[in-house]
Structure formats: structure tokens, C-alpha cells
Amino acid sequence: MNTKRETYLNPDTLPFPFCPGCGHHTILEKLNQALVDLALDPKEVVIVSDIGCAGLSDRYFDTHAFHGLHGRSVTYATGIKMARPELTVIVLIGDGGFGIGGHHMLNAARRNIGVNVFVFNNLNYGMTGGEHSVTTPLEARTSTTPYGQLEQPLDIPASVGVNGANFAARTTTFDPDLADLMTQAIQHEGFSLVDIWELCTAYFVIQNRFSKARMQETLEKLDFETGVLHDRQRPEFSRAYREKAVSEGKRENVVGLTSLDPSFESSLPRQKSLIIAGAAGAKISTAGTLFSQGAIFSGLQATQRNDYPVTVKTGHSIAEVILSPEEIYYTGVETPEVVFALFPEGLAKVQKQIKALNPEDLLILNADLPEVETAAQTWRLDFRSAKRWGRKKEYRAIMALGVYLRASKIYPIEAFQAAIELSPRYAEDNLAALEASKDVEMG
Ligand SMILES: Cc1ncc(C[n+]2csc(CCOP(=O)(O)OP(=O)(O)O)c2C)c(N)n1
Ligand code: SF4
Ligand SMILES: [Mg+2]
């Protein structure tokens, strides 16, 4: 949807925090101009910021934002674009971030993922004190090249261009057409990048008596052309991937392509937060997902956040699930209302959350585990009473959720069954375990 706005800048967060004369001011003003010209719906735009002074940029815009680790911004942007190809995903990264995450950038270019990268190239690490970066020109003095830079500076547009980017350009903050170039980059399908040379007035300008004229001389000396340097039409990755998956009959494997249309009803009046605390290999996160999908089939919103150690086959496995009739804005569960403690590994991990339970909350405890002190009502589930299925540890979470669902009636058990049927390979066993959960005795 297109919307005409006068600005995308948020007056509550302005002014920008940069030093006087810092080129970052100009880049953000021109980005704002480009967004105004494109008249994009701010809800359809995501600004993914990197680290450093350049990384401070996202909070000044009335768009979505994501801020992560140094050099990794393009990886988050890739994930966002893969999940929601219709969004405009803009990466704001410094030359330092480009160097630190260079490998990610090359792969994003190879993939031709449709994100738009604007490099705030002030030829040094501004935020940490003017150290040299991958783009510091030959002979330049920085706090880490006191005798002058000896390394060949990286040609950013060439490096992404040679690796398959659809669009790569270089310019400076003194370019009167900068906003138009940014607009062109955003409009271009596929990976686009504009390398924007600018001044770090706190460090690089002072240490090198750098200026607009010296910048021009440096570009010429390095034989770095400006303007649009690569302009091609390779297929954009997120769309190409979808088309391929659909043509291979794997539509259900692509996020956002299959929708779970509600065909059941839920009586849940307000948000409910659950924690399923189990062990690695016990299908805890799968059970959480099926349970969440059952909720979606019943017209609820659902989120899930998993936690497990890097050692995948040992240790705890925790699934935090939120169900709600309203939109859910935060996906973590800090104060659950229901805790399923099914295995010792999980129980050890959720001690704090169990302590925080109130008398109206519920602890569902595997009867094989020791007594737990809690203010909440406790159900002790004797899985052994369900014989064959109860003995299999990978069905314990499905069974416990079945017991809870039958008692709480927050949505119909048939919706849970319908969710289980979405994965035909395991459906038969999961459905049998859910049926057997009727035999689980409660102490
Ligand atoms: C992985 C990692 N390495 C180093 C740092 C420390 N660090 C913070 S900001 C910064 C420099 C940022 O330089 P640049 O990306 O060019 O942005 P600028 O400040 O110049 O806008 C560094 C090295 C970090 N945060 N993370
Ligand atoms: S340190 Fe450099 S990059 Fe950071 S705000 Fe100041 S001038 Fe800009
Ligand atoms: Mg920099």
C-alpha cells in the first residue's frame, strides 16, 4: 500500500546523535527523502541497523527496526526478506560492519536476496576511536595505522557486483542526486547496494585533513568510479525460492505460503502463557508447535520461543508458548500461567518461573519427578498409567498437552488433532498418543 507522508522521521527521537558535520546526518536525511518519494507504507518497511555510529540510525524512523550484532545486519535482513518478501528491507551498515561481516555480504550478493544495503563509508571505525577499516585508503593515518595504511582498500561495489548483486553503486554524501540513487536502489529487484563515501569529522577528517576535495582525489587515485556500476536482472532469491518450492510441490515448507485457516472456535478470553519444560530428544518444541497450530486453527494468535543448549542431544529443551485472541507483541514468557515440568533437565531450568507462579496458576508435573514447592495448583501426571504410549518419552509432551486441553477447554481437542495431521509422517503415532492421554491418571 502506498501512503503519502511528509516525513518518515520520528520527531520524538530526533535530533540525530552524530557529531557536527558527520556524513551520517546527510545519509539519513536522504534516506528519508527516498522513502517520502517512494511513498511506502511505513509498516511495510524494515530498517535493519548494524553497529557503530551508523548503527544508531534505526530509532529515528517511523518504520519497523531490527538491531543486532556487528557485521550481521545483512543476515537478519535476509531472514526477514525470506519470511516476508513483500517488505522493503533496508540495511544501514558502516564500512567497519562491512569488513567484519564481509562474508555475509558476499553471500547475500551471491544469493541476490532483495535487500537494500546503504554503506555509511567514512573510511574508519568512528564509534570506537577512528581505527582503520577495510576501506581506509592507502597511506591514510588512523589510530591503528600510525605510519599510514599499507593494505589495499576494499572496492565495495566491485566485490558485491562480481559476486552477483543485481545493483551496485558508489557515490558520496556531496552528491546532489543521492536521494534519487537510494530510491533507484530500493526499487531495484534483488540485492542492491550503494557505497556512500562520507566524512567522519571526529577522526578521519582530523587525522588526514580530509575534505570533500580530498575525497574526490582519493576516489580518482584509486580508480574507483562513481555512479551505477552494476545493473542486472538476475532473479531475486526469496521469490525464486518460493517459486521453486511450489513447483516441487513443497509449498508447506515455505514460511508464509500456507495459512492455517481457523475452522474451530476458542473460548480463551485473554492471553495465556505456557512453558513446556522437557529434555532434548523428547519432541518438546514439536509438541509446542502442534499445540500452537491447533490454537491458530481455533482462531487464536500464537507464538513460540524455544530454548535448548548447543548440545542438541543432551540437556534441557524448553518451549515458551503464548496463545491469545489479540495480536501478540512480545514472544518471550517471563511469568507463565501454566508450567509443564516433564523431565528433570527441564524442571531444573524453570525453578524461577515455578517460584513465580500464583495460586490461580497451574503446575503440571510428571509424577516421576520429586515434589515441587509452589503456590500454584499442581497436577501430577502418572504417564505409566497410559501403558505403551506413556512409557515413550518423546510422546510425554503431546500427552500432557492433551490432558491440559481436555480439562481447560481453551480450544477443541479436534483442532489439536487437525494440527497433528499437518505432518503426515508422524501423525499416526502422535494421534494415538493424544488418544492415550485420556488414560493418564492425575494425582
Ligand atoms: C563483533 C564486534 N567487533 C567489534 C565491536 C566493537 N565495535 C563497536 S562499533 C565499532 C566500529 C564501527 O565502525 P563502523 O561500522 O564503520 O561504523 P561507524 O562508527 O564508523 O559509523 C566496533 C569495532 C563490536 N561491537 N562487535
Ligand atoms: S565519531 Fe565519526 S562516525 Fe561517529 S558520529 Fe562522530 S563523526 Fe560521525
Ligand atoms: Mg565507519
Image: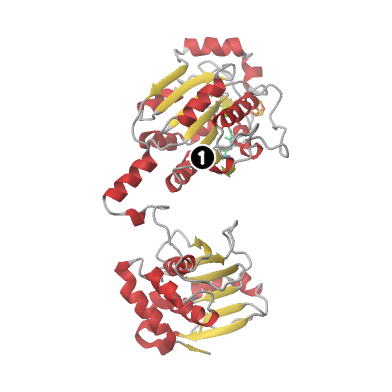
Q: Tell me if residue 93 comes above or below residue 243 in the rendering.
A: above
Does the image show residue 91? Answer: yes
Which percent across, then down, holds residue 303? 52, 61
At horizontal 36% and vertical 77% (from top left) the residue drawn is 431
Near-viewer residue (68 or 79): 79
Which percent across, then down, holds residue 436? 39, 84
At horizontal 58% and vertical 16% (from top left) the residue drawn is 176
Which percent across, then down, holds residue 199? 62, 20
Q: Dot 1 surroundings within 10 Å: few (below 14), some, or many (20 or more)?
A: many
Which percent across, then down, holds residue 208? 61, 15
Residue designated by label 1: 73
What color scheme is it?
A: secondary structure
Does the image show residue 154? Answer: no
Query: What amino acid does circle 1 point to?
Result: Ser
* Quadrant field for ligand 3: top right
Q: Quadrant of residue 397?
A: bottom left
Near-viewer residue (168 or 72): 168
